[in-house]
């Protein structure tokens, strides 16, 4: 199995870099991966429950280069280079492409868009709606109409302490010969929601799903652990009037959230193609 790493930010003023360690094939976060200084052979940190890590940069944070080695049991070690004077997520879009020899040729694409939004249960819900409406749109436009892909996954994170505090992640695998045709559709669907809002049928499906899911989740320990964690850590009640909030979400709410994500102009695409 192979590790993939996305360097999300090199903060010049504060002098740190942060990133996410994921499984190359499934795009799932790898928890507990060790991040080491490859030059000094010194462990620096391990990834958290979301696969994220933050480490200080050595020397001049604006110009230094750091070689990191990422290891995890069952995975091939990976060495990456973080260069502070090369922008990571900046104004606009950065595309990072590289090639690897694969037994089964694939285009493996991960797209990260970040923005600052209000930290609240309402924002969290609007991001969830955006995620799910995008998933429906991708199923229709990429998987069923165009083919050539194994499905598009969409996820999001909202963190009170992070800046930017909202991350929208879009990932998919596809036939490499179709990458040039399919990849623009990924961005077009997000832009479509920002311009026109989500389809009414999609909004309805999401409301029905989240209402049904709530009834199933509210009887589990995991759900209440999640709610209590937010109350203690973020001083926010993510359970209060949840179903009312779901039913109150409008197409305009989802549209505005898509607009905020795109208006931030902070996007990085990491694409691995077969040699």
Image (cartoon, helix red, strand yellow):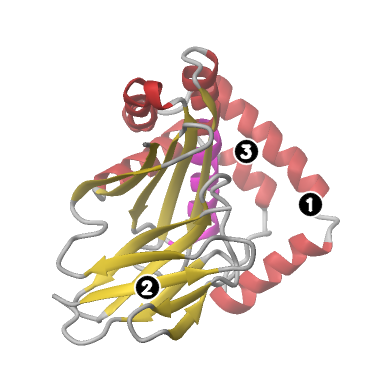
Q: Is residue 189 above or below residue 101?
A: above
Q: Earlier in the sequence, mark 3 or mark 2?
A: 2
Please provide percent x and percent y for residue 141. Answer: 47, 18
* Vertical comparison of 170 with 35: above or below: above
* Magenta span: 119-133
Out of 170 and 222, give the one closest to the viewer. Answer: 170
User: Residue reaching furthest top?
Assistant: 145
Q: Is residue 132 magenta?
A: yes
Decide whether the magenta segment is chiefly helix, strand or loop: helix
For the residues labelled 3 and 1, the Cα–Cα distance comes to 17 Å
Q: Which residue is mark 1?
A: 217
Mark whose residue sits in front, 1 or 2: 2
Q: Nearer the viewer, mark 3 or mark 1?
A: 1
- Picture coordinates of residue 34, whole percent (x, y): 52, 75
Residue located at (37% from left, 73% from top): 68
Q: Residue at x 69, y 65 (%)?
A: 226
Answer few, some or many: residues within 10 Å of disc 1's Cα (few below 14, many 20 plus, some between 14 and 19): few
For label 3, the residue is: 247
**Mark with earlier residue (1, 2):** 2
Q: On the rendered structure, is 182 left or right of 29?
A: left
Q: Quadrant of residue 257?
A: top left
Tag 2 residue: 68
Query: In this view of the protein, which residue sits in the foreground, 68 or 211?
Result: 68
SS type, badge 2 = strand
Identify the image quadrant of the C terminus. Answer: top left
């Amino acid at each position: 199995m192979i590790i993939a790493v996305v360097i999300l930010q090199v903060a010049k003023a504060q002098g740190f870099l942060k990133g996410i360690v994921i499984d190359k094939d499934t795009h799932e976060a790898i928890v507990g991966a060790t991040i080491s200084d490859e030059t000094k052979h010194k462990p620096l940190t391990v990834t958290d429950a979301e696969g994220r890590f933050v480490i200080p940069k050595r020397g001049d944070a604006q110009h230094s280069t750091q070689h990191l080695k990422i290891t995890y049991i069952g995975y091939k070690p990976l060495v990456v280079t973080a260069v502070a004077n090369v922008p990571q997520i900046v104004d606009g879009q950065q595309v990072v492409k590289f090639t690897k020899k694969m037994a089964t040729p694939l285009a493996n694409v991960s797209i990260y868009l970040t923005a600052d939004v209000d930290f609240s249960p309402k924002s969290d819900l609007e991001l969830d709606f955006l995620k799910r409406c995008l998933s429906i749109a991708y199923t229709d436009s990429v998987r069923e109409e165009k083919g050539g892909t194994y499905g598009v996954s969409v996820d999001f994170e909202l963190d009170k302490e992070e800046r930017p505090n909202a991350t929208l992640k879009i990932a998919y695998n596809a036939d490499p010969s179709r990458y040039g045709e399919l990849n623009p559709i990924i961005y077009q669907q997000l832009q479509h929601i920002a311009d026109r809002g989500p389809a009414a049928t999609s909004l309805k499906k999401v409301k029905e799903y989240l209402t049904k899911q709530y009834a199933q989740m509210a009887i589990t320990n995991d759900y209440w652990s999640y709610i209590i964690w937010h109350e203690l850590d973020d001083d926010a009640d993510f359970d209060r009037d949840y179903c009312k909030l779901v039913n109150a979400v409008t197409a305009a709410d989802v549209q505005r959230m898509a607009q905020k994500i795109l208006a931030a102009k902070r996007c990085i695409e990491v694409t691995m193609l077969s040699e």
